[in-house]
């Protein structure tokens, strides 16, 4: 990926601002309005380009420039996109993180970045002041909203019209760091991921290719990064009313209303949003005539949800189950028609969940399961024979132009998470999978969450898909209790509303007895509501469930 490709992507955004200046760029809820359904406002491409240029000028005057690490803690809004584009224009490096990971954990992560600039909403600045020592290198601060008891600039005071005094900027090259984004830490310690300008250019092209190189026209945005990609493709980006750390609480009526009102053509959402949307559409049928494609991510979408969406939406709507991470987006895709051509039945027999073929220009393979560092490809080849003992299931590793090759922090993450292969770097996903003869990836669970029994390892998603078919079960989670190598497999389960716990427990036992893969499971525990990740409200916190299960089993004994 060359620097020219990167600038072509940015120039595409500017071209829209020149040729279609009045085209809506970001459509967002009006926070000042009241009523049962939200009202919306919008900002055009020209306005967004001008606003981001103004921010670039003011930040430059404040000493923020190429390479300046800048913490950005702003809710999804036109302000967020204007700030991000403004930082990109001057080569500064936005640092983004999910505040929902917990206050002290977030501060610990941000301390490691040693940022020199801080742009955030008032509660974020209150944290900066409260933990002043953790942000001691910050020299420039900008408040989005009302400033409380701290000094610094206010974004609103800068206006939105550029003065035209920005200095000449040096184009970024492909390997220059574009953004530092933190993983949620939902299945391990949070890590600071470096994404480069080349990574962004590749993501734009890969997303465009996944859509058949058809312009997105109007997109429903539930993840800020997807908004950046779609703005670079000229989309009208609709932001529905949602709380980033509580996506599952989003009112599906507002989502359906936004799709119909603005003629949304494509949308990205996690299962936490798609499941309530399905339930709403089953109760309140709506044609959603303009919707052409749905892309999911964050966690595997239950096959019954995909089937339900196919039933309530138009026949020609394409529904994609996607797979990716902070380090690489996208990694693979599969469309619902292929999924229901026999692959779902295979999943229910314990083969894992098919997440499709690698995305455009992504190479993927599996390596032997190990918790040790794998510094070079030579070590991968040394361990290759061990894949036979796990029936070809190993850790999924990927390489490609959109894949991050380096962590900013901690250094140990690079040793544990990257493999050097000549001039290529492979990323260890931490996910367990196998690849079939058709080149499709079958996801079997997280490596850190595998259950290590005396008879060998058991893989969470592979096992859970067998049990998720039982009537009355909302979802299941396999956890291990006891010391690694002698763990006791326990199946936790959530009930559908009104289901009888005892009857469901008996049905789960009977189902488990049918398969060699699950016969060793003797403990089945109903749970009132699984803990889930912050970003997508979909990844199950099996580590927390394991501690809960250990207490329950100990108390029962």
Image (tube, rainbow, N blue to C red):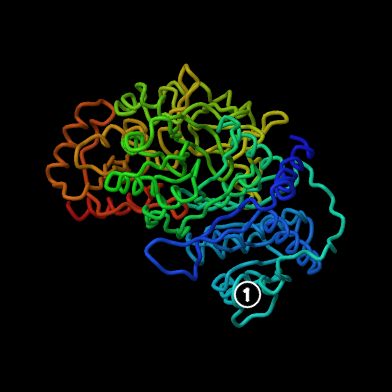
Q: Residue furthest bottom?
A: 149
Q: For the N terminus, give its image quadrant.
A: top right
The picture places residue 376, in percent across and down from the top left corner, at 64, 31
- Above/below status of 29 relative to 272: below
Q: Residue at x 53, y 53 (%)?
A: 190
Is there any visible trace of residue 64 in the rendered image? yes
The picture places residue 471, in percent across and down from the top left corner, at 19, 38
The picture places residue 455, in percent across and down from the top left corner, at 32, 30
Q: Residue at x 65, y 66 (%)?
A: 119
Res 515 quadrant in image: top left
Q: Residue furthest right?
A: 168
> Which residue is more in the foreground, 263 or 222?
263
Q: Is residue 94 left or right of residue 397?
A: right
Is there any visible trace of residue 460 in the rendered image? no
Q: Residue furthest top?
A: 437
Q: Residue at x 52, y 50 (%)?
A: 223
Count of residue discs: 1
The picture places residue 91, in percent across and down from the top left corner, at 76, 54
Decide: few, some or many residues near mark 1? Use Cα within 10 Å; few <14, some 14-19, many ≥20.
few
Q: Is residue 272 left or right of residue 402?
A: left
> Which residue is more in the foreground, 444 or 18?
18
- Above/below status of 23 relative to 131: above
Q: Is residue 25 left or right of residue 454?
A: right
| Residue position for label 1 | 132
Res 463 quadrant in image: top left
Q: Is residue 201 left or right of residue 515?
A: right
> Which residue is more in the foreground, 28 or 133?
28
Q: Secondary structure at mark 1?
A: helix
């Amino acid at each position: 990926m060359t620097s020219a490709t990167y600038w072509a992507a940015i120039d595409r955004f500017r071209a829209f601002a020149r040729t279609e200046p009045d085209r809506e760029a970001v459509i967002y809820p009006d926070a000042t309005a009241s009523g049962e359904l939200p009202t919306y406002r919008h900002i055009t491409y020209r306005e967004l380009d001008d606003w981001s240029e103004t921010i670039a000028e003011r930040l430059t005057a404040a000493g923020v420039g190429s390479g300046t690490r800048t913490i950005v803690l702003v809710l999804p809004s036109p302000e967020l996109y204007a700030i991000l584009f403004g930082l990109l224009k001057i080569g500064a490096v936005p640092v983004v993180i999910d505040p929902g990971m917990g206050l002290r954990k977030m501060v610990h992560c941000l301390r490691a970045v040693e940022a020199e600039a801080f742009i955030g909403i008032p509660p974020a600045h209150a944290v900066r002041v409260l933990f002043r020592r953790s942000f001691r290198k910050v020299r420039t601060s900008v408040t989005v909203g009302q400033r409380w008891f701290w000094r610094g600039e206010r974004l609103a005071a800068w206006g939105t019209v550029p003065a035209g005094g920005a200095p000449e900027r040096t184009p970024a090259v492909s390997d220059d760091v574009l953004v530092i984004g933190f993983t949620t830490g939902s299945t391990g310690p949070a890590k600071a991921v470096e994404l480069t300008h080349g990574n962004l250019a590749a993501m734009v092209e890969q997303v465009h290719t996944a859509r058949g190189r058809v312009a997105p026209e109007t997109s429903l945005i539930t993840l800020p990064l997807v908004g950046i990609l779609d703005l670079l493709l000229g989309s009208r980006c609709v932001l529905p009313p949602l709380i980033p750390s509580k996506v599952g609480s989003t009112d599906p009526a507002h989502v359906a209303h936004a799709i119909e009102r603005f003629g949304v053509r494509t949308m990205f959402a996690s299962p936490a949003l798609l499941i309530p949307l399905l339930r709403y559409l089953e109760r309140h049928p709506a044609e959603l005539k303009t919707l052409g494609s749905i892309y999911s991510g964050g966690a595997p979408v239950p096959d019954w949800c995909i089937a339900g969406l196919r039933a309530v939406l138009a026949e020609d709507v394409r529904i994609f189950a996607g797979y990716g991470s902070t380090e690489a987006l996208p990694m693979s895709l599969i469309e619902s028609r292929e999924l229901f051509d026999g692959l779902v039945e295979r999943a229910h027999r314990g083969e894992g969940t098919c997440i499709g073929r690698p995305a455009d220009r992504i190479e993927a393979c599996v390596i032997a399961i190990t918790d040790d560092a794998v510094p070079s490809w030579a070590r991968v080849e040394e361990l290759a024979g061990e894949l036979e003992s796990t029936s070809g299931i190993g850790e999924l590793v990927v390489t490609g132009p959109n894949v991050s090759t380096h962590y900013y922090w901690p250094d140990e993450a690079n040793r544990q998470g990257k493999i050097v292969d000549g001039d290529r770097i492979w990323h260890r996903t931490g996910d367990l999978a196998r690849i079939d003869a058709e080149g499709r990836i079958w996801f079997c669970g997280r490596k850190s969450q595998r259950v290590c029994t005396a008879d060998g390892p058991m893989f969470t998603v592979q096992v859970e898909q067998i049990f998720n078919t039982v009537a009355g079960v909302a979802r299941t989670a396999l956890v291990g209790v006891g010391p690694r190598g002698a763990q006791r497999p326990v199946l936790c389960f959530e009930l559908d509303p009104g289901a009888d716990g005892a009857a469901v427990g008996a049905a789960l036992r009977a189902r488990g007895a049918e398969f060699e893969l699950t016969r060793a499971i003797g403990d089945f525990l109903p749970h009132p509501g699984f803990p889930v990740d912050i970003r997508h409200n979909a990844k199950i916190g099996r580590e927390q469930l394991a501690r809960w299960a250990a207490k329950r089993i100990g108390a029962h004994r």
